[in-house]
Amino acid sequence: MNYSDRTPGPPDDTGPRTPTSTAPTTPLNLSRTTATAARVLRQLRHDPRSIALMILIPCVMLFLLRYVFDGSPRTFDSIGASLLGIFPLITMFLVTSIATLRERTSGTLERLLALPLGKGDLIAGYALAFGALAIVQSALATGLALWFLDLDVMGSPWLLLLVALLDALLGTALGLFVSAFAASEFQAVQFMPAVIFPQLLLCGLFTPRDTMHPALEAVSNVLPMSYAVDGMNEVLTHTDMTAEFIRDALIVAGCALLVLTLGAATLRRRTT
């Protein structure tokens, strides 16, 4: 049979095809981000222990602290505002780092990133979901401290709430970031002494930062928790919003945004 006499047919579809990419066309998309946040919130709804840890633990710690200093209310006034920001930061760091690591070890993260979902969408979705819980957490803790535990502050309660919320968002960002470097939930918890404890010691909670050794003071000047404590102290001692408060709030917010960006850049599909 002469193959040259065949009637030309349709092109052969068995040859190599150009792969169709499912990668997102934009680095960040509102619909993908909100869909991710909604999925995370639905999952958290079935995990009441995590919700209790995020929302109630800061309130419980503030309640205990108030009555530890029952005989010295001024001591609670002097450190209560600072701890109002530190407790949410610590709890959001723990819960977020473990929750994100669980997504990766279970294979959920790998399946999600196989869809038209960018790393930025995923990180922003997590930040949005945990940020919503941070609002509830910060509002409850601030209300408890001011109206039930009689925390005495000169500034507006709304400014106190703003700094507490920024601290919680910073804890969320740090948790998302360090989860990329942990291979297990136990390792995620181990990052707390490395990431949180140095900031806790150098933030000015125990002694003014300008009285520390110059080397430690220099280190404290680049740690975000230092500016969170400074912002709380501004609300504690000033009736109006000061330039220092605005600077401190912007630094904490900027650090949270920077860490979220680094978290998106270092996010891995699975744990090796």
Image (cartoon, rainbow, N blue to C red):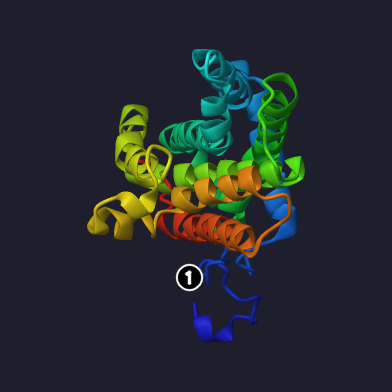
Drawn side of residue 34 relative to residue 263, left or right: right
Would you place residue 148 above or below residue 170 in this image? above
Would you place residue 102 above or below residue 150 in this image? below
Residue shown at 44% from the left, 60% from the top? 265
x then y, percent, for residue 197: 34, 37
Q: Secondary structure at mark 1?
A: loop
How many labels were placed on the picture?
1
Residue shown at 32% from the left, 51% from the top? 211
Amino acid type, label 1: Pro
Pick whichever, 69 or 146, lies toward us: 69
Q: Quadrant of residue 182?
A: top left
Q: Quadrant of the C terminus?
A: top left
x then y, percent, for residue 178: 39, 45
Note whether residue 126 is visible. no
Would you place residue 191 above or below residue 54 in this image? below
Pick whichever, 33 or 216, lies toward us: 216
Drawn side of residue 38 relative to residue 130, left or right: right
x then y, percent, for residue 110: 48, 45
Pick whichever, 57 or 96, lies toward us: 57
Residue shown at 57% from the left, 66% from the top? 20
Pick whichever, 33 or 202, lies toward us: 202
Note whether residue 199 is visible. yes
Residue shown at 62% from the left, 20% from the top? 56
Q: Quadrant of residue 25?
A: bottom right
Task: Name the residue carrying label 1.
Answer: 16
Would you call the spot at circle 1 few (<14 residues within 10 Å), some (14-19), or many (20 or more)?
Answer: few
x then y, percent, for residue 158: 76, 44
